[in-house]
Image (cartoon, helix red, strand yellow):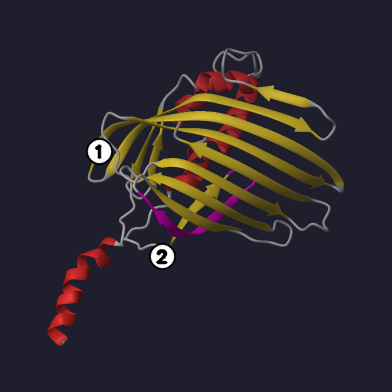
Amino acid sequence: MKFLLLLLLFVSAPTLFAQKSMIQLQLKKGKTYCHALDSHSEVFQKTNGKTTKTNMHISARITYKVKSIKKGVYNLETQYTKMNISMVQGDGNELSYQSDKPSEDILSNFFYQMCKTPFYITMNSFGEILSVKGIDRVVENGVKGLDLSAEQIVKIKDKLNESYGEKAFKGNFEIITLIYPKIAVALNESWFTETAIYSGQIQAKLKTNYRLLEVNADYLKVQGESEMISDEQTESLKLLGSGDINLSLDKNTGWIHSAKVDQVLRIGNKEDANYSFTKVKTTYSDQ
């Protein structure tokens, strides 16, 4: 009986071990991958007791061409091919910025130039961005030819770097790429990741608990719950954020086939004179 039990365990062992999956990026040199982004946000802001509400829609497309692979690190030529933003303010005023042609509007012209200028990121197989190079050239090209004073150009470049510079890009991008476990995981098993979020207002850590929900012939389904906490919490600038992320990953490459990200961010206390509440729903697809 003992021999039969041992034999049964031996035969079933490969099946048991096969339940674990190593989830990571396995991209191919020379191939181009892409993400189409569609984001809707509602921003409620109270400044000195006066409240405003803004609705914003962002649509963008980014391509990533694998230029080289070395020891599990990917060098990606990255380029925006589309960036459109539209806003409806509380008073009904509508604003729109588009990348499809040159414009006298500063932001539209920046988006147009941005979509003509590639930059380079290096990323490991776990989705961690190791470097971002060339974003400064994107910003330089974006303000080129503007009929503004040198002082105004410097201020605009500072603002653009806050929103689209290296630190901002790394934090925003890692929300959907720093998702891969560093060990093989089984169905319903969890793992944690942590990344830094940066903008003019925010310097925080985003901690996410991921779980492998499903494995089928083509895709892996992954679910995550995140918490954002400011690096320097004070009562006057109290920041709290949370998010839910649902991912479908290509089983062969690990590339994100689709993603849905819901985020909520609060800055300050609701009872105070200065307070903001932001709700964002974003989808990504590889089409």
Q: Counting residues from the N terminus, which is met first, the one under dot 2 or under dot 1?
A: 1
Left or right: 164 in relation to 43: left
Say above or below: 218 vs 180: above
Image x and y of residue 208, in percent = 50, 58
Image x and y of residue 216, in percent = 37, 50
What segment carries the magenta color?
199-216
Query: Identity of the amino acid at label 2?
Result: Glu
Left or right: 106 in relation to 272: left
Main structural element of the magenta stretch: helix, strand or loop? strand
> Can the viewer see residue 174?
no
Query: Identity of the amino acid at label 1?
Result: Ile
Q: What residue is disc 2 on?
A: 189
Q: What residue is disc 1 on?
A: 69
Residue 142 sits inside the magenta stretch:
no
For the point 39% across and 62% down, which residue is it? 187
Residue 13 image-quadrant placement: bottom left
Left or right: 6 in relation to 100: left
Image x and y of residue 146, in percent = 61, 15
Q: How crowded is mark 1: few (under 14 residues within 10 Å), some or many (20 or more)?
A: some
Residue 212 sits inside the magenta stretch:
yes
Left or right: 177 in relation to 8: right
